[in-house]
Image (cartoon, helix red, strand yellow):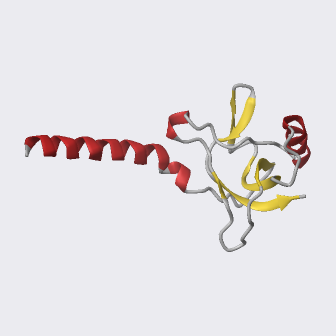
Amino acid sequence: MKKFTIIVGILVLLGSIVWLGAKDALVPLDRQVIQKPLYTVAETMAMDSERPPLVFGRAFWGAYPGARAFPSAEAAHQFLVAEGKQDRAWSIYRLSGDYELDTYDHRGARYTARSLLAVEAVD
């Protein structure tokens, strides 16, 4: 019985650690006032106005840096071309965040600092 209690305690502790690492990533920010639009690239996804797709930000204490962030659709398009991903499988999306407030620099590139909603697909 003592071993069972220890195992259950360890599992609860591990579950709590995982939850703490992921909980902020599961709740998207929908900023109402945006001074500088924020764009990202992702595999093409279905847009639904009732439930816009979630684009994850930094999670698990930085182990996942977040989605790549761009200040303009043109910059995102240049990235797709440079990476050879300008086909129909990849698209550019405007997010529900502000480029200045909701991104951070990681190894010379900008990433989303928090989870955001993909509010519009950009052609």
Residue at image position (46%, 43%) is 21
Q: Give the quadrant of residue 78.
A: top right
Q: Is residue 113 left or right of residue 22?
A: right
Residue at image position (55%, 50%) is 25
Q: Nearer the viewer, residue 77 or 29?
A: 77
Q: Position of residue 92 (x, y in %)?
A: 82, 52
Quadrant the C terminus occupies: bottom right
Q: Position of residue 83 (x, y in %)?
A: 84, 36
Query: Residue lying farthest top?
Result: 107
Residue at image position (7%, 46%) is 1
Q: Nearer the viewer, residue 103 or 78?
A: 78
Residue at image position (53%, 54%) is 26
Q: Position of residue 30 (x, y in %)?
A: 66, 59
Q: Position of residue 4 (x, y in %)?
A: 14, 45
Q: Nearer the viewer, residue 43 or 16?
A: 43
Q: Give the quadrant of residue 64.
A: top right
Q: Nearer the viewer, residue 46 or 87?
A: 87
Determine whether 95 is above or below 17 in the image: below
